[in-house]
């Protein structure tokens, strides 16, 4: 007897997943006494193809997050041309030799984490006459292997970025240690925003976005809860 082929696995329904995330976030906002316009949902599309982005666009999403300049350059020019209100956020580490390309393609930068990068960004913004808002990445867990400004150094760093370099710094970003309860990290970032007069708080991902909203997040970065399991970067390039 010929064995019947197994049916292909069901495709991940990006539209349904996006609507579920949006509803969960709205519920968290209501519980925290916040308005829908107070929190921006960034759909983290890194390593997902343009088709996945299109599905989210059709569901109404307009803010997207990418980790790599190279991937964003390959994926988003046509999408942005077709959707002029699409906003692209850089949420991954930025090398100084990629700053020129990053300023050209991204609308918001979440990973400003060192003076050398700040100087390069200021120079390139002047050249391109383009000033994407920037978040200072804070290493709230003081992890030696992770990028970000140490909490004790944030004040001096912000002063250099704003006063000397005139960068459009709008807030702070953090990625808590994976094994830690995120609440203290989110609370620390919120306290920094109050102390330095920077309202933007980029914090919270698929597993803790509702908590981040409760603790003041203005931008939450959600990937797997919207797009499903993430393919490798190599797989996404080959699609």
Image (spheres, rainbow, N blue to C red):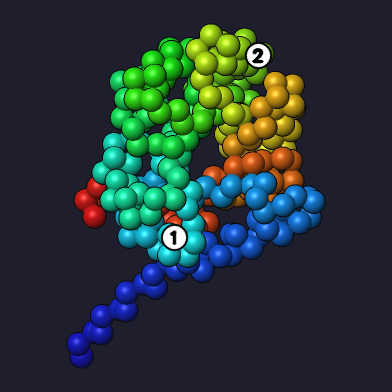
Query: Residue 11 appears in which quarter of the rendering?
Result: bottom left
**Mark 2 crowdedness (10 Å alpha carbons): few <14, some 14-19, many ≥20:** some
Q: Position of residue 12 (x, y in %)?
A: 42, 66
Q: Position of residue 82 (x, y in %)?
A: 33, 55
- Mark 1 vs 2, N-terminal side: 1
Q: Position of residue 167 (x, y in %)?
A: 51, 20
Locate the C terminus by quadrant: bottom left
Whether residue 66 is situated above or below residue 23 in the rendered picture = above
Q: SS of the residue at dot 2? A: helix
Query: Residue 74 appears in which quarter of the rendering?
Result: top left
**Alpha-carbon distance for marks 1 and 2?**
38 Å
Whether residue 83 is situated above or below residue 214 in the rendered picture = below
Q: Residue at x 49, y 24 (%)?
A: 112
Query: Residue 205 appears in which quarter of the rendering?
Result: top right
Whether residue 5 is situated above or below residue 233 in the rendered picture = below
Q: Is residue 45 left or right of residue 182?
A: left
Q: Residue at x 59, y 59 (%)?
A: 21
User: In this view, which residue lies farthest toward the front?
Assistant: 129
Q: Residue at x 61, y 29 (%)?
A: 171
Q: Residue at x 65, y 14 (%)?
A: 155
Give 196 or 203, whichever is nearer the viewer.
196
Identify the mark at residue 56; answer none if there is no mark: 1
Identify the mark at residue 86; answer none if there is no mark: none
- Is residue 32 at least partly visible in the picture? yes
Query: What residue does disc 2 label?
Result: 155
Give 1 or 76, whichever is nearer the viewer.
76
Q: SS of the residue at dot 1? A: helix
Q: Position of residue 152 (x, y in %)?
A: 66, 13
Q: Are marks 1 and 2 in contact (CB under 8 Å)?
A: no
Locate the N terminus by quadrant: bottom left
């Amino acid at each position: 007897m010929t064995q019947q082929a197994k049916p292909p696995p069901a495709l991940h329904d990006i539209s349904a997943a996006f609507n579920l995330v949006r509803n969960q976030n709205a519920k968290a906002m209501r519980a925290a006494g916040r308005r829908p316009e107070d929190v921006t949902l960034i759909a983290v599309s890194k390593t997902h193809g343009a088709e996945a982005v299109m599905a989210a666009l059709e569901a109404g999403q307009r803010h997207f997050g990418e980790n790599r300049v190279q991937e964003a350059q390959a994926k988003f020019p046509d999408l942005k041309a077709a959707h002029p209100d699409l906003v692209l956020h850089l949420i991954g580490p930025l090398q100084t030799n990629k700053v020129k390309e990053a300023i050209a393609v991204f609308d918001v930068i979440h990973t400003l984490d060192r003076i050398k990068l700040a100087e390069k960004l200021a120079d390139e913004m002047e050249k391109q006459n383009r000033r994407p808002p920037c978040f200072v990445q804070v290493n709230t867990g003081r992890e030696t292997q992770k990028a970000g400004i140490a909490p004790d150094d944030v004040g001096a760093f912000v002063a250099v970025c704003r006063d000397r370099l005139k960068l459009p710094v709008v807030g702070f970003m953090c990625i808590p240690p994976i094994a830690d309860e995120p609440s203290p990290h989110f609370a620390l970032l919120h306290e920094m925003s109050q102390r330095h007069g920077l309202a933007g708080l980029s914090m919270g991902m698929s597993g803790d976005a509702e908590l981040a909203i409760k603790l003041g997040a203005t931008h939450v970065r959600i990937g797997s809860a919207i797009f499903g399991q993430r393919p490798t970067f190599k797989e996404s390039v080959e699609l």
